Image (tube, rainbow, N blue to C red):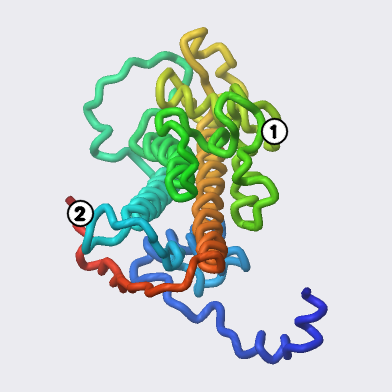
Amino acid sequence: MAVSIAQNVPVDMIRESQNLDGFSLGRSKREKAYRRWCLEERLFLNPLNDLGAHSIAANDVLTLPSLTEIKPPTRPGFAPPIIGFFNQMKQEFASARFMLFEGLIAEGVHFSDKDVLLYNTLDYPSYSLAMERVRTSFRIAYSLLDKTAFLINDYWCLGKRPDQINFRNVWMVEGKKTLLPAFEEYENWPLRGLFWLSKEIHNEALKGATAPDARELHDLRNHLEHKYLQVHEGWAVAGFVDAFATGELGKSLSSHEMEAKALRVMKIARSALCYLSLAIGREEELRDSKRPDGPVFSMPLSTWDDAWKRSR
């Protein structure tokens, strides 16, 4: 494909005419630093960010494609609920991303941490608003994976029990390790990409995760949500803190490890949202090719202006 394009398209001329870095990164130094970090970490919901850290990609333009519904709308006069759901997922991702950034660059003691009485457990714990932002970003990003599965179940009409769905098992026959018949020989490559992405996540019933750290990410999520996860100052762990700092009560790791794992899950969540949008776009093409002729009524949607976004 690349050879064919090079033979028929003036690639060099097109490349010279493009200005990928002539776009604003914001007004304040803080905003510019944030957007530059997002670009470098490939965290914008924008396919152009995959090309590199170019300022043209410093925005979250990825949305759902145009949708066609055959069944009567559940809310006449309103957009399909799936659009609001994807909006919410995007907002959660963007907010978690900024929390992670703030947690990584924080300096000094935040006023909210003052006069919070804590005992010195002698294992150099990392207690601060900054670290809680990092921990929270991990939790939100990981939760987006299960929400992706929930949306897949609804959009593809899989009929699975909502309270039993997760990112690993949504593709499978209930209680088995076999792929749902609906997804066999399926002509939707972005959806296949989403399926293989799900294999980077651990599931007790479904073995064979492709990522070496899948079990560790799963355990971290479990401890963050339900158990005891103690984060220690990164400089202290190697020489002063052993693996038994939490005893049998919980799990411990360094602040550097926590930050790296949070960034890792943010990138998985970003990939999931990108694949999901592309997969629904491909599915709409497949459905349109099989849809019988007949009138189709359009419902244009406007965008939610930044000025309407409230702080509370």
Q: Label 1, on which residue?
A: 212
Residue 45 is situated, as x and y percent measured from the top left of the image, at 48, 60
Q: Quadrant of the N terminus?
A: bottom right
- Report crowding for label 2: few under 14, some 14 to 19, many 20 or more residues within 10 A (C-alpha): few
Report crowding for label 1: few under 14, some 14 to 19, many 20 or more residues within 10 A (C-alpha): few
Residue 283 percent across, percent down from the top left? 54, 59
Q: Secondary structure at mark 2?
A: loop
| Residue type at tag 2 | Ser
Residue 111 found in image quarter: top left
Q: Residue at x 25, y 69 (%)?
A: 305
If you read the primary sequence from the N terminus, does the residue marked by circle 1 or circle 2 appear first? 1
Q: Nearer the viewer, residue 25 or 211?
A: 211
Q: Residue at x 70, y 30 (%)?
A: 208
- The residue shown at (39%, 54%) is 86
In this view, 105 is above or below 179: below
The reply to whether residue 39 is visible in this rendering is no
Could you tell me if residue 6 is visible in this image? Answer: yes
Cα distance between the residues tagged 1 and 2:
40 Å
State the image coordinates of residue 8 (x, y, percent, origin top left): 77, 88
Element type at mark 1: loop
102 to 116, vertically: above or below = below
What residue type is disc 1 on? Pro
Left or right relative to 68: residue 264: right
Q: Quadrant of residue 129?
A: top left
Question: Which residue is situated farthest in the top direction here?
Answer: 248
Camera-nearest residue between 123 and 132? 132
- In the rendered structure, the answer to whether residue 208 lies left or right of residue 305 reads right
Q: Label 2 belongs to which residue?
A: 311
**Disc ID at residue 147:** none
